[in-house]
Amino acid sequence: MVDPARTYPSLAAVRRPEAAISPPDDLVAWLKSHPNLAVTSSSSFVTASGLKGHRLEVSLRGSNARCPEECSALFHFGRTVFVFLPLNRNRLYLISAGEQTVVLAVESRSERFDEAAATAEQIIASLKVGSP
């Protein structure tokens, strides 16, 4: 899971803590309009642990993107940053949990993505959300 509360406009911005931006109210629309990303599937509605949300497939724009210069970092993930890599496909689940949005990310090389996504679907279907 990634933390959309610490969102970045670019990988270079991660090096500057003051560059973190507050997440937009409509995270789906923000991802669709992000200049470094291509949303490769229509947003579909999903349910995870009884909570409703959206599912998007996302990749970097441009086939010749190089890291670290042209990777796109959007969210914090623990002590590191979730980065979209040029050769990978990504599926994001944006789940509404009360006042918060939980972002679940599935990332894999394109040639193994269908297998990874199928496994992730099973894991997401088994999630249980409760109070701490």
Image (spheres, rainbow, N blue to C red):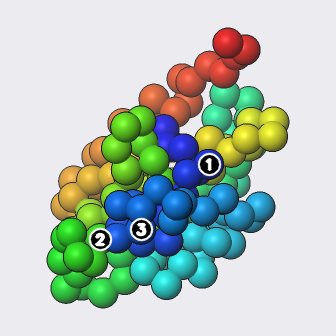
Q: Is residue 127 above or below residue 38?
A: above
x and y percentages locating residue 108 in the rendered image: 27, 53
Q: Residues within 10 Å of mark 2 (few under 14, many from 20)?
A: many
- Quadrant of the rendering where the C terminus is positioned: top right
**Label 1: which secondary element:** strand
Q: Which mark is residue 37?
A: none
Residue with the mark numbered 1: 5
Residue 120: % across, % down: 41, 38
Residue depicted at 37% across the width and 83% down the height: 61
Secondary structure type for disc 3:
helix
Give whichever of discs 1 and 3 has the lower sequence position.
1
Residue 114 in the figure: left or right of residue 7? left
Q: Residue furthest right?
A: 98
Q: What's under tag 1, amino acid-wise? A: Ala
How far apart are labels 2 and 3 at the CA level? 12 Å
Q: Earlier in the sequence, mark 2 or mark 3?
A: 3
Q: Residue at x 45, y 29 (%)?
A: 123
| Rendered image quadrant of residue 65 | bottom left
Foreground tag (1 vs 3) = 3
Give the label, 2 or 1, closer to the camera.
Answer: 1
Q: Residues within 10 Å of mark 1 (few under 14, many from 20)?
A: some
Quarter occupied by residue 96: top right
Q: Nearer the viewer, mark 2 or mark 3?
A: 3
**Residue 95 at what x, y percent from top left?**
67, 44
Q: Check whether the beta carbons of the residues at disc 1 and disc 3 lie within 8 A of each other.
A: no
Q: Dot 2 corresponds to which residue?
A: 71
Residue 9, percent from left and from top: 49, 71
Q: Which residue is mark 3?
A: 13
84 relative position to 9: left or right: left
Circles 2 and 3: CB distance less than 8 Å?
A: no
